[in-house]
């Protein structure tokens, strides 16, 4: 593969990865404890509403989960995989593209949750300004993920091991998704 091809793939991954980050936040924010008036939340909704808003009439939310946002994220991953396949010169199989998009979406969301927990754990060593919108988003998204892990002992330690437990569980899930991808012959997974 030439250097130009690798640079082109990197740029494609950057563009699609940025879109996926915004749509993944659109999926995660309603499930979190983040205020709707948070500036990051407002940006995400304003950016995604032109596409996700009309789709919500066809794909209404299930409880707090935006099925329209999940569908858009899946389409973005399918478009990314197809674009990279075209750049590399691989044939595009529509059925495989659909399954690769689904596996990629699972892997992307798990990876995002893992890194948010790492950021949460690092922030716990410092005293971040809780009024900061980014801090509120990280805490708001990680709180529902970490809540079940707070019940796991030891409780008498001066630090909580919940981020460690949650990170371990997510990494194990990522290994299973990776093995599933390998078994199905998936073309590509998002960057870890």
Image (spheres, helix red, strand yellow):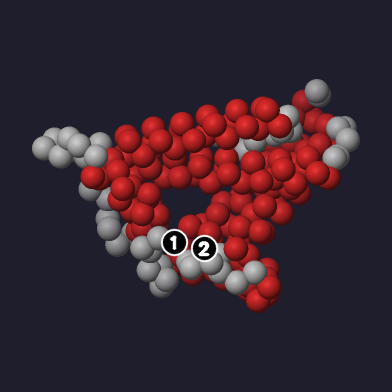
Q: Is residue 171 left or right of residue 70?
A: left
Q: Is residue 182 above or below residue 87?
A: above
Q: Residue at x 60, y 72 (%)?
A: 60
Q: Residue furthest top?
A: 1
Q: Which residue is mark 1?
A: 31
| Foreground of the two, 100 or 121 | 100
Mark 1 lies on a secondary structure that is helix
Q: Position of residue 129 (x, y in %)?
A: 27, 55
Q: Is residue 38 above or below residue 106?
A: below
Q: Position of residue 22 (x, y in %)?
A: 57, 56
Residue 58's disc is none
Q: Which residue is mark 2?
A: 65
Dots 2, 1 in contact, CB < 8 A: yes
Mark 2 lies on a secondary structure that is loop
Q: Which is more N-terminal, label 1 or label 2?
A: 1
Q: Is residue 31 left or right of residue 14?
A: left
Q: How many other residues sit within 10 Å of disc 1, few (<14), some (14-19) or many (≥20)?
A: some
Q: Position of residue 125 (x, y in %)?
A: 24, 40
| Foreground of the two, 155 or 188 | 155
Q: Quadrant of the N terminus?
A: top right
Q: Is residue 131 above or below residue 163?
A: below
Q: Position of residue 183 (x, y in %)?
A: 68, 28
């Amino acid at each position: 593969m030439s250097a130009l091809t690798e640079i082109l793939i990197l740029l494609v991954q950057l563009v699609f990865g940025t879109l996926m980050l915004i749509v993944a936040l659109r999926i995660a924010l309603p499930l979190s404890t983040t205020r709707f008036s948070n500036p990051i939340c407002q940006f995400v909704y304003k950016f995604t509403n032109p596409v996700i808003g009309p789709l919500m009439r066809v794909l209404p939310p299930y409880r707090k989960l935006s099925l329209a946002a999940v569908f858009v994220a899946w389409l973005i991953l399918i478009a990314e995989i197809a674009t990279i396949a075209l750049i590399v010169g691989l044939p595009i199989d529509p059925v495989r593209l659909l399954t690769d998009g689904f596996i990629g979406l699972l892997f992307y969301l798990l990876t995002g949750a893992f890194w948010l927990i790492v950021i949460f754990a690092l922030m716990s060593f410092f005293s971040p300004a809780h009024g900061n919108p980014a801090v509120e988003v990280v805490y708001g998204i990680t709180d529902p993920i970490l809540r079940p892990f707070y019940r796991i002992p030891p409780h008498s330690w001066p630090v909580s091991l919940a981020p460690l437990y949650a990170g371990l569980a997510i990494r194990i899930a990522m290994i299973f998704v990776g093995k599933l991808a390998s078994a199905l012959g998936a073309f590509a997974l998002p960057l870890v």
